[in-house]
């Protein structure tokens, strides 16, 4: 199967997509929110987690007021760098919270992890409780081409997970998570697609390079929409028959997001996206998704199969990364010429913020 590749930022933005403030986090402990998920077993609740430096816990938050309803610790888990959170039904049909310990700013981790726990049924009458989940399912994971930084996890109905890597050069690989957790061994992620971001001019994040870096991902509860965000924009694909590689060969709709200092989380809630940001008391916005094109309306950019300098698929079907320098578009190098000095400072800043 050819890997799906898309030039994401080539999509025209949808006009009139300004976000509406929904709430602000009222809990000062939520100071580095890096993901957000919409409750299934607990309607009217959203779940968030802090990234590195916090305990292995996540917060249940009132989706109208921003008040913390409960805090859940995950036994046996460690928060090395929890960069995203998803809520979806697993293979049993059970609503679940998925926690992605996949951050790796220095691309040095030989193993990253994903934890899954049954979604709690939040008791609003007893708000503020400190609770413990059941033992999590644990995926111990590595990339086929060596360590990579990532901040984005999307989980489809039924539990199929996808990790989207982060790169200052605008080239993000999409990896499928093995279907079954196995805490006794390290499993290898399988690359299924690549997304190439370019400059959009939308403000957001610490600098213009934030327009190139994937910071969050989400699937709709029905599995029909895939969303991937950067610090500044969100990209939406209509999903056909659950085939993510084929989906990412189509052109996305791009939504300019409200300007956020370090916007990282994204979730699909009905016909809107919810987006959050790091920072105590930060605002969560709802951004209308408008209409997505159908599969017949989308165009198919060049796939990775015809670009051997970017990625290849070996005989076993496992994707391996080759030189991304050769596959980088000429416009990116032109743009980086103007950003190189600022980019060096931004890279240091982005590495430090999660420690």
Image (cartoon, grey):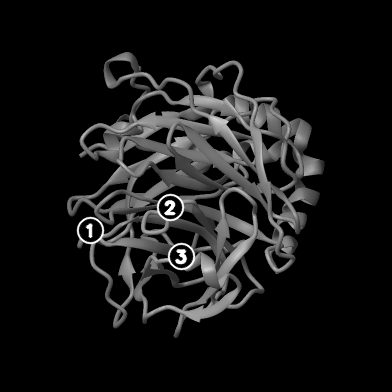
Q: Does residue 25 appear to the left or right of 170 in the view shown?
A: right
Q: Which residue is mark 3?
A: 99
Q: Which residue is mark 1?
A: 93
Badges 1 and 2: C-beta atoms under 8 Å apart? no
Q: Quadrant of the C terminus?
A: bottom right
Q: Which residue is mark 2?
A: 43
What is the distance, in whole Å, between disc 3 and disc 1 at their CAs?
18 Å
**Whether residue 152 is visible:** no
153 lies above or below 128: above
In the depicted view, which residue is nearer to us: 341 or 299?
299
Residue shown at the point (57%, 47%) measured from the top left: 167
Q: Does residue 108 appear to the left or right of 340 in the view shown?
A: left
- Bin the neighbour count of mark 2 within 10 Å (Cα to Cα): few under 14, some 14-19, many 20 and up: few
Percent x, y for residue 86?
44, 55
**Label 1 SS:** loop
* Quadrant in the picture for residue 22: top right
Badges 3 and 1: C-beta atoms under 8 Å apart? no
């Amino acid at each position: 199967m050819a890997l799906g590749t898309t030039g994401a930022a080539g999509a025209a933005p949808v006009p009139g997509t300004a976000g509406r403030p929904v709430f602000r986090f009222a809990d000062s402990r939520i100071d580095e929110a890096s993901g957000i998920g919409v409750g299934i077993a607990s309607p009217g609740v959203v779940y968030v987690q802090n990234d590195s430096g916090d305990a292995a816990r996540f917060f249940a938050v009132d989706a109208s007021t921003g008040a913390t309803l409960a805090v859940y610790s995950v036994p046996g888990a460690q928060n090395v760098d929890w960069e995203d959170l998803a809520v979806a039904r697993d293979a049993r049909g059970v609503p679940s919270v998925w926690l992605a310990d996949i951050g790796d700013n220095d691309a040095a981790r030989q193993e990253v992890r994903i934890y899954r726990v049954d979604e709690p049924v939040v008791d609003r009458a007893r708000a503020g409780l400190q609770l413990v989940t059941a033992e999590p399912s644990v995926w111990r994971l590595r990339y086929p081409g060596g360590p990579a930084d990532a901040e984005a996890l999307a989980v489809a109905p039924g539990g199929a997970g996808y990790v989207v890597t982060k790169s200052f050069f605008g080239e993000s690989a999409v990896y499928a998570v093995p279907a079954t957790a196995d805490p006794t061994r390290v499993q290898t992620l399988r690359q299924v697609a690549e997304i190439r971001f370019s400059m959009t001019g939308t403000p957001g994040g610490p600098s213009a390079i934030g327009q190139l870096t994937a910071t969050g991902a989400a699937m709709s509860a029905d599995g029909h929409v895939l969303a991937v965000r950067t610090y500044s924009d969100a990209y939406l694909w209509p999903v056909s028959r659950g085939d993510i590689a084929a989906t990412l060969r189509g052109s996305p709709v791009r939504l300019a997001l409200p300007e956020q200092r370090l916007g990282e989380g994204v979730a699909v809630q009905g016909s809107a996206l919810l987006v959050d940001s790091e920072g105590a008391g930060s605002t969560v916005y709802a951004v209308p998704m408008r209409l997505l094109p159908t599969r017949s309306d989308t165009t198919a950019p060049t796939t990775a199969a015809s670009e051997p300098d970017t990625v290849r698929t070996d005989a076993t079907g496992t994707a391996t990364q080759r030189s991304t320098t050769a596959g980088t578009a000429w416009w990116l190098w032109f743009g980086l010429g103007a950003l190189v000095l600022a980019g060096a400072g931004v890279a240091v800043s982005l590495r430090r913020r999660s420690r």
